[in-house]
């Protein structure tokens, strides 16, 4: 089954830093907290917690930061610093000051900007370990070649936070979809369902995001064909997947603030459905959760002009004689 891959790649896995270390992390808000990058600060925090204890966690924002963004950042345990002038100057000054703090062992930066090179060099001169989170291998090469450790943030669609699922690897045929959705609605659920279906063309992946029990967004993927649909465009195909014969699903519970961040930075996934209101409004019409049946024609139509770009996970496993790993399918 499709698994959400690790979002971070450690350039120097052998050089793990001690958990006894105290950490200061500085985040370049305007440069990194952008909708097209879809960063989840909780993942940055969790990654750093593997290195030690976070003593300073500061996000630098400009005067254009929205109240929603500020609130979400604060609720995740970060201090915000609003700057009217250049954010990079303010952040570099603070990072340099912290370099002289004997209680701090590691100074971390989350940015795409090489302007922080002098601050990093100063930290290293003061005997600090330095870490930089970069968007990808091509970002801020000067920083990458200077710090002790690089963490490449691998952006994944909408960067959904990944916790231990509250429901794990359950066969789709064990549930009635509309009852599942209503149960989540009654519980005012915040989080998402991840459903993997064994389709004609390979594994189909559906994500249905919930906010306070109502459907807030959708993602639909078909591996091997570069099919990535979001929001309203993905809605019908996601619901269609719940009518499949062979599928496995997981349910991930998120905090209210995590859901807020996901939706703030991912407009394209948004497509809201109030489960109860929709049912009342469609009492004498076809309700989208009633009698869901998998429609293969929808997938055929979607892929009719598409060229397969790479082998699917399922095909690779079959080639290696490992198809028994997916015997549920």
Image (cartoon, helix red, strand yellow):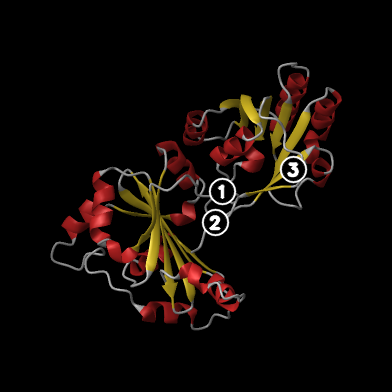
Q: Residue 169 or 4: which is nearer the viewer?
A: 169
- Would you name the residue on which mark 1 appears? 38
Residue located 67% across and 26% down the image: 24
Q: Residue 145 or 236: which is nearer the viewer?
A: 145
3D distance between C-alphas at marks 2 and 1: 8 Å
Reading the chain from its start, which is encountered first: label 2 or label 3? 3
3D distance between C-alphas at marks 1 and 3: 19 Å
- Would you name the residue on which mark 2 appears? 157
Q: Position of residue 79 (x, y in %)?
A: 57, 25
Left or right position of 148 against 76: right
Give the SS element for disc 2. loop
Reading the chain from its start, which is encountered first: label 2 or label 1? 1
- Would you name the residue on which mark 3 appears? 150
Left or right position of 253 against 306: left
Give the SS element for disc 3. strand
Q: Neighbour class for label 2 at 10 Å: few (<14), some, many (≥20)?
A: some
Left or right position of 182 against 171: left
Q: Position of residue 194 (x, y in %)?
A: 42, 57
């Amino acid at each position: 089954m499709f698994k959400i891959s690790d979002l971070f790649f450690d350039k120097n896995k052998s050089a793990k830093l001690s958990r006894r270390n105290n950490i200061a992390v500085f985040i370049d808000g305007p440069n990194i907290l952008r909708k097209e990058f879809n960063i989840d600060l909780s993942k940055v925090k969790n990654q750093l917690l593997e290195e030690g204890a976070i003593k300073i966690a500061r996000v630098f924002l400009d005067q254009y930061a929205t109240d929603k963004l500020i609130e979400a950042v604060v609720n995740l345990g970060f201090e915000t610093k609003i700057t009217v002038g250049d954010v990079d100057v303010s952040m570099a000054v603070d990072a340099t000051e912290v370099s002289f703090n004997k209680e701090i062992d590691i100074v971390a930066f989350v940015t795409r900007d090489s302007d922080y090179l002098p601050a990093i060099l100063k930290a290293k001169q003061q005997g600090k370990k330095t870490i930089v989170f970069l968007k990808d291998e091509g970002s801020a090469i000067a920083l990458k070649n200077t710090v002790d450790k690089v963490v490449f943030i691998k952006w994944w669609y909408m960067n959904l936070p990944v916790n231990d699922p509250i429901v794990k690897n359950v066969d789709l045929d064990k549930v009635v979809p509309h009852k599942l959705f209503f149960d989540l609605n009654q519980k005012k659920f915040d989080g998402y369902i991840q459903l993997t279906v064994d389709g004609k063309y390979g594994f189909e992946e559906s994500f249905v995001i919930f906010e306070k029990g109502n459907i807030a967004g959708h993602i639909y993927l078909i591996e091997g064909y570069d099919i990535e649909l979001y929001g309203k465009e993905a809605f019908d195909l996601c619901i269609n997947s719940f009518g499949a014969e062979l599928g496995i699903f997981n349910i991930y519970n998120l905090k209210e603030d995590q859901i807020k961040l996901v939706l703030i930075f991912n407009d394209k996934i948004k497509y809201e459905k109030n489960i109860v209101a929709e049912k009342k409004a469609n009492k004498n019409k076809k309700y989208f959760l009633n009698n869901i049946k998998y429609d293969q024609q929808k997938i055929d139509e979607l892929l009719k002009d598409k060229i397969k770009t790479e082998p699917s996970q399922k095909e690779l496993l079959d080639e290696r004689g490992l198809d028994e790993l997916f015997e549920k399918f």
